[in-house]
Image (cartoon, helix red, strand yellow):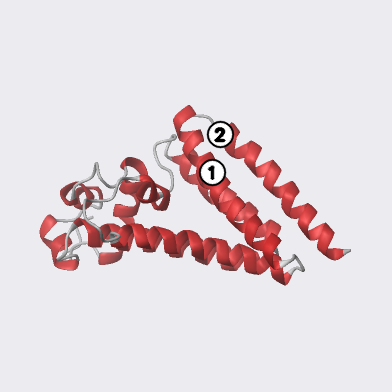
């Protein structure tokens, strides 16, 4: 906390990702993001001179990369292991935060973007994160013999249904939606792998 050099850029980004996962982006000011990371506003602007959108974009990329690292590691053991790790990560975040936190990528993706024709960079980063997760899952399924179209569809289904279940769990303060989705997805992946082994 009281390090003379102030908080690192990485810690500010991680803190921003956490606060966005709780409150969303539009309801959060850069001052609140700095405070949540226990960082002075001055050093936050030093690292992120373009302000909130720049910090939010970095926070989404940080969250997306953290999930990608987990998936790469766990998918070594196969698609089912990757799915379980993906489910376990979000279960842990929702439960540990007492249903206050969800996925910062989803939080940014569902909010109304600021006015203007340009796609805000944080929203583009959210799309990249989702695509990255899908790509890793689909690649693992293909490596294990699943037809490419089926692999792509299953990967999208995994990401979309887990993200939707996280929102349902937070709304209902109950992990049952994620549990039900987990069982169905595990069965679908087992069936896809079983079909490809034949």
Q: Residue furthest right?
A: 198
Q: Residue at x 49, y 38 (%)?
A: 95
Q: Please provide percent x and percent y for residue 164.
A: 51, 42
Q: Quadrant of residue 196?
A: bottom right
Q: Please provide percent x and percent y for residue 4.
A: 16, 64
Residue contact at pointers 2 and 1, CB within 8 angstroms = yes
Other-residue count near label 1 (Cα within 10 Å), few / some / many at <14 / 14–19 / ≥20: some
Q: Is residue 3 visible?
A: yes
Q: Quadrant of residue 91?
A: top right
Tell me the quadrant of the picture where the N terminus can be found.
bottom left
**Which residue was labeled with disc 1?**
91
Q: Residue furthest front?
A: 117
Q: Please provide percent x and percent y for residue 56.
A: 28, 57
Q: Give how far apart the Cα atoms at labels 2 and 1 are.
A: 8 Å
Q: Nearer the viewer, residue 195 or 186?
A: 195
Q: Nearer the viewer, residue 6 or 66?
A: 66
**Which residue was labeled with disc 2?**
175
């Amino acid at each position: 906390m009281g390090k003379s050099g102030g908080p690192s850029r990485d810690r500010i980004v991680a803190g921003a990702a956490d606060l966005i996962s709780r409150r969303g982006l539009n309801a959060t000011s850069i001052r609140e993001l700095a405070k949540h990371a226990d960082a002075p506003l001055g050093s936050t602007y030093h690292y992120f001179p373009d302000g909130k959108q720049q910090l939010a974009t970095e926070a989404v990329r940080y969250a997306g990369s953290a999930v990608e690292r987990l998936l790469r590691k766990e998918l070594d053991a196969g698609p089912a292991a990757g799915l379980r790790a993906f489910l376990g990560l979000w279960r842990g975040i929702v439960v540990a935060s007492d249903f206050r936190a969800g996925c910062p990528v989803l939080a940014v993706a569902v909010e109304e973007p600021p006015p203007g024709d340009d796609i805000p960079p944080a929203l583009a980063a959210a799309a990249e994160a989702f695509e990255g997760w899908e790509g890793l899952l689909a690649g693992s399924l293909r490596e294990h013999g699943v037809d490419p179209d089926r692999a792509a569809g299953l990967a999208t289904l995994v990401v979309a249904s887990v993200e939707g279940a996280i929102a349902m769990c937070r709304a209902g303060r109950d992990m049952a939606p994620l549990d039900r989705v987990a069982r169905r997805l595990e069965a679908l992946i087992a069936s896809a792998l079983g079909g490809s082994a034949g």
